Image (cartoon, helix red, strand yellow):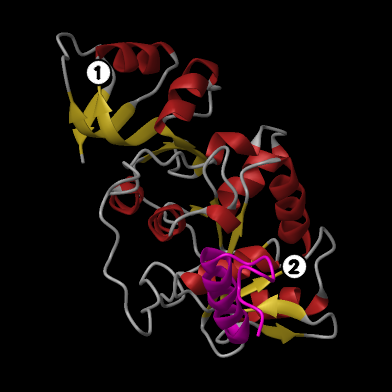
Amino acid sequence: MESFDEVGLSTNEILAEVREASRIVKITAIGDERLPAGPTVLESDAIIILEGRADVLNLLHCGIKNTVAVEGTKVPEIVAELSRKKNTTVFVDGDRGGDLILKELLQVADVDFVAFSPRGRSVEDMTRKEIIKSLRNKVPADVVRAQVAKNEPLSDLVFEITAPEDEAEPAAQSEPVIPEAVEEKPEPKEPISSVEGHAEYMKGTGRARVLNSDAVILGDYTIKGLEDILPRLDDDAAGIIVDSAVGQKFVDTAYKKGIKYIAAREFTGIVHRPAGIRLIPL
């Protein structure tokens, strides 16, 4: 009988193949195109649209089963049909390829939210902790549509994960529980209409939101993205909500741009508040 060494397979390679085989068993195929999908995508109230098969496999490995992959820039009809019936999140790589797929989906599907992998990472090789964090920091699809309409880079919306990689992972379970951020009840499609509503929504996101005078979203950004774009805000911007600490330099720059209020988690080192700008603690 041939040994494993004789057939050129190491113990680690054999274990990897067994693990991969067990994961592939859970994947299903839907529609005429036989698209790779998680086993609960058809009956779930919420779905996650991914780019490819490897993404579906990775999320399955993390216990997230309500997924489907488009497998290209042309959106299959079954994906568009599912999006019209369910609360839909698109989860793509934060790169040019992801941008192309996302723009096509925004045109032909009914998308509610968009999540991105961090810069320099692909959904298929993200850890469970990173995946859940990115999904919790999803942005409303209307924000992305506004970014596209203004011909501004979608990279401004890409979530940057800063949590230490050695942070403890949740204990393994024989049957992983789908995170609340994924299998959640459908959220209302109507936009949040008040400053207070936006402030409540932004708590815990680690992100920033710019509003006009009618509390309509002009853009959602990472904290660094907001700092970069703040000097370039136009006259429509009236308020900023920041789930982070804000200092004197930020306040002064916002005042010069005509911002009327800043809601922030904390204000630090403020020695002078310019007249005409409100500082609101979250």
Circle 2: residue type: Val
Let me know if residue 41 appears in the view: no
Q: Secondary structure at mark 1?
A: loop
Instruction: Please state the horizontal and vertical placement of residue 242, each as a whole percent of the image.
Output: 33, 35
Residue 278 appears in which quarter of the rendering? Answer: top left
Circle 1: residue type: Gly
Instruction: Please state the horizontal and vertical placement of residue 114, each as a whole percent of the image.
Output: 56, 56
- In the rendered view, tell whether residue 187 sits above or below residue 118: below
Marks 2 & 1, CB-CB < 8 Å contact: no
Q: What type of secondary structure mainly makes up the magenta span? A: helix
Q: Is residue 2 left or right of residue 199?
A: right
Q: Is residue 2 left or right of residue 43?
A: right
Q: Which residue is mark 2?
A: 70
Instruction: Please state the horizontal and vertical placement of residue 36, each as a whole percent of the image.
Output: 70, 76
Q: Callout 1: 10 Å neighbours few (<14), some, many (20+)?
A: some
Residue 39 appears in which quarter of the rendering? Answer: bottom right
Image quadrant holding the N terminus, namely bottom right
Magenta stretch bounds? 1-26
